[in-house]
Amino acid sequence: MELRTVEVVNPRVPMFGSGALVAPGLVLTAYHVACPGGDRQPVTVRDKIGRTAEASIAWADPELDAVLLQTDRTVLGAGLFVARWGELTCDYPDARPVCSMTGFPRAMRRPHPTAPDAFVGEPMTVDGNIKPATGSRLGYYGFEVINTSMESAELWQGMSGAGAFCNERLVGVATFASDFRHGGLLHLMPAARLFASPGFTDTVTAVTGMTPQLQPADLSVLLDDVADPQLSTSYLLGARSAVVPLTGMTTQLDSLEAWCRTSRPTDVTAVTGIAGTGKTRLMTELMHRLGQPRPGAPTARGWTGGFLADTPVQQPPHYRMLATSQFPLLLAVDYAETRRDQVDQVLDVLAARRTSQPVRVLLLARGRDNWWPSLRRARQGTTVMSTGATIDVDPADALAETTVEHAFDTAKHAFTERIHTLQNAGLGDDWATSPLRPHTGRPGADPVVTAATKPVDVDDTVISLHMAALANVLAALNDDFARYDNPMDVLIAHEVSYWRRIVEARGEYFDEKLMRTLVAVQAVTGAKKLNNAQAAVTAGFDVHHSGFPDAAPNDRRLLAAYEDILTAAYPSGDGAHWGSMGPDLLSTALVAEVEDKSAGQFIERLLPHPHLAEDQQHRALTVLARAAPTQPVLAAGAARAVASAPDKLLPLAAKTVTAELDTDIARTWLLGLQDALTEQAHQPDADPDLYGWATDLVSTSLTHVETGLGDYFNSPEWQPPQDQPEEETETEDGLETDGGAADEPDPDQAPEKYGGGHEENWEETADGDDDADGTPIAPASTGTQALRPTVVVHTITGQTARIALTAIALAHLAFVAFVTGSVAYFSPYSADPSFWLLPPLIISAHLFIGSFYGRQQLPAAFAILMAPPVVLLMTVGFGLMFSDLHKADLNLVVMGMVWTGLFSPGMLALTYAFRAWFGQIQFTDIPADRP
């Protein structure tokens, strides 16, 4: 933060002080320093290395003792990003942040070496703590300086106007100093009060081109940061960059605001919708609205909050800080369906809090079928969740209150304005062959028809509309981009120019094809730590240069250089080592392009790469499976990769899909994986045992997904097997006992013969009993039982077949109930109460036949074979009595055949309906050709 420190001098009076550059050419300082006695004439501003410029008043508030000075941005602050603003929101002594401040106090003034009557101010950085209660009655922060011997307030003169930073957020400006027994107490004007002052945010927006946002500085170690402004496609399209004003979604926004302002201390809700519908942008707008004073209550305290980081900077994270919030707090969790454990940790902390300030947790997800019902069951009606209501965002909601054409023009105008702002801030591009053309400053201006201008479908998501609008603007501003036929190609080409600037600034040769591959790897695998990033870059180089077995080993210097390039291009907003290109539609389009250029080999070679960590493979599978609706080529590539190495990737893939993806996407992905496994199993070198296990695992996972049973690997049906008895094996020396229990099926590792990671039960068979094939099972030892592994196999996967079987089965049960009930009511035996027990018994017998024979793999025993005919015969007997009651004019044999023909198909349909919904329990060691 020292680079932001400047010295402010009023030449007309002997007044000097400090200031903080909040943006190039924009200085925040104390009013009494820049305008002593109300003098608003220009003042002199000097940075640490002596560059000087004249500054004028841009905004001032004498009551807050704060002022914004505007000066030459090319002289002071050139190259600096716009500062982030923060406030202190929690009182958690165990993790209280250390704040810092750099200024020019009187104690650091030294005589000028050549001018005896002049002095030179030297900068001084001090650290301190800001405790929420200190100075709170007057609305100040008390900055308690630590590790200093200056006890006199006079020595601190000159620090007035210095900016106080906490976790790289500007939280306040120093206004005066007080005597303090063990150091100094500097009084700060909080940034939150500056935001509430009329004209402050408008002035910052006018100078920087970006609306300032107030963030919780002390919670920043737990929250995801906003990306620094860049002239890149990824930044311009980022939902949290908020380049394009929010359109539509008024109903959802109003509902969320009303939900936040209810009287409950804590509550949780979910916002769901497919990718690109504006969920994150909706959350950003909600935070902005809640942060403003309410109409009629200008002094009311606004809300604070942010997006919970997937990988918090603070490790281990102190989520207990959230429970000490002194102000209303709104937390958002993006991709909540993939972060259930983290959500539970936060809710557990909030459930035990004692403060009265409202806290709201907003869970953003693409679907809710697989995770939200279980979370609601666990939390609904508790102190952290009321009803657990959800808010759905449909693709059309963002355009519900406007026309597509107007939304398109609004987006074009917003992108043009932001590009000009970024270029004026020194973040411009060389634009290859043509300079940036001037704009007229109104929506709909500069109508340019290029090859990249595609008609926008009304059914497209709002992000698709914004991507088309940005492509149109870029093609109009740069002639090189106008030659592309597809808007996506324009956006990627612009991102390539962003990469080129970074690569060439580091003196490296720009290899565009290699860079596309590496950015695709970065987007797929991510990297939480440096070694993960190094592994990803190494894997990217190997995949990119695959097919050259005799090539020299990768140059380590080059690998390190590209790791640094990728980190600079897409820095992480949290504690992870790097981020990735966004939004998802853009990054997956790039990955699909790389996959296509590699003839479908990119993903298949990347996923099983030995250098990648398991969490990187997990992320890759999530990203690729999530992209299935828009980029089916990626789901197909991932399925081939898993099928080529099922022992390594299949358990992880099955866990990822069943636990994190919505039902429709998970089902589509698993069916594709099933086809890939079948194709791979027919290869000459395929291990039949391995692929038999893999097929069983996918079938079981598919059963749980289709029946709505959720995550199979965390379901009650997944149980470790019991210990098997010691098994004697014959060796050359005689009998040898296999010590200990047999290996238990492990969902993360395939056993030697049949694999692991699938649903296994262990059925007991008595000593000497026959197995399902009629083959005697030798007893393991006297008085014990042999344990046999079983697996639930889903053989009926078609939705149409399942619905048809269910409909016939239900009709059959209703028909049986009607016939037996009619006989019981109208027959002469109705007077006997015991006769009324027969109809429910017959219906129960049908249900037993359907469930038992539909789910079990049964031996050909006499009792097993006779049970269904006996139940059928009883039902036909009631049918004959029904015919007799209605005087049917047919002989007994014919009527018996008619009733048998009516009941038999229904009983058979009932059996297969149970199998379709719940699968069939089979032994894992049955012959492959067994029906």
Image (spheres, rainbow, N blue to C red):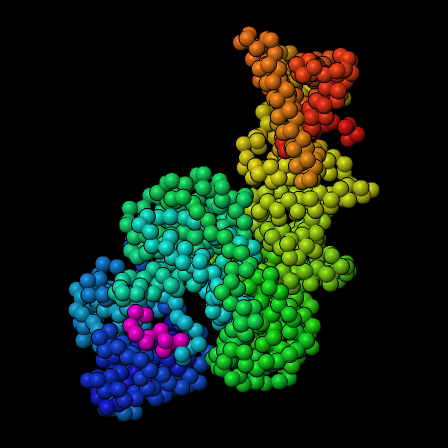
- Residue at image location 49% in from the left, 41% down from the top: 373
- Residue at image location 20% in from the left, 71% down from the top: 177
Instruction: Tell whether position 216 is magenta.
Output: no
Image position, residue 557 (x, y; %)? 62, 67
Q: Is residue 567 left or right of residue 552?
A: left
Q: Nearer the viewer, residue 149 or 187?
A: 187
Q: Is residue 44 left or right of residue 256?
A: left
Instruction: Give the overall secondary structure of the magenta segment.
Output: helix
Q: Quadrant of the C terminus?
A: top right
Number of residue marks: 0
Q: Is residue 414 visible?
A: yes
- Residue at image location 68% in from the left, 60% down from the top: 592
Figure check: 819 above or below 601? above
Magenta range: 195-205
Q: Nearer the viewer, residue 388 or 778?
A: 388
Q: Nearer the viewer, residue 690 or 340?
A: 340
Instruction: Tell whether position 200 is magenta.
Output: yes
Figure check: 34 above or below 367? below
Figure check: 845 above or below 82? above
Figure check: 472 above or below 634? below
Residue closest to the far right: 684
Image position, residue 308 (x, y; %)? 44, 55
Image position, residue 233 (x, y; %)? 57, 70
Q: Quadrant of the N terminus?
A: bottom left
Residue 14 placement: quadrant? bottom left
Residue 714 placement: quadrant? top right
Q: Nearer the viewer, residue 727 or 190?
A: 190
Image position, residue 85 (x, y; %)? 37, 68
- Residue at image location 59% in from the left, 18% down from the top: 821
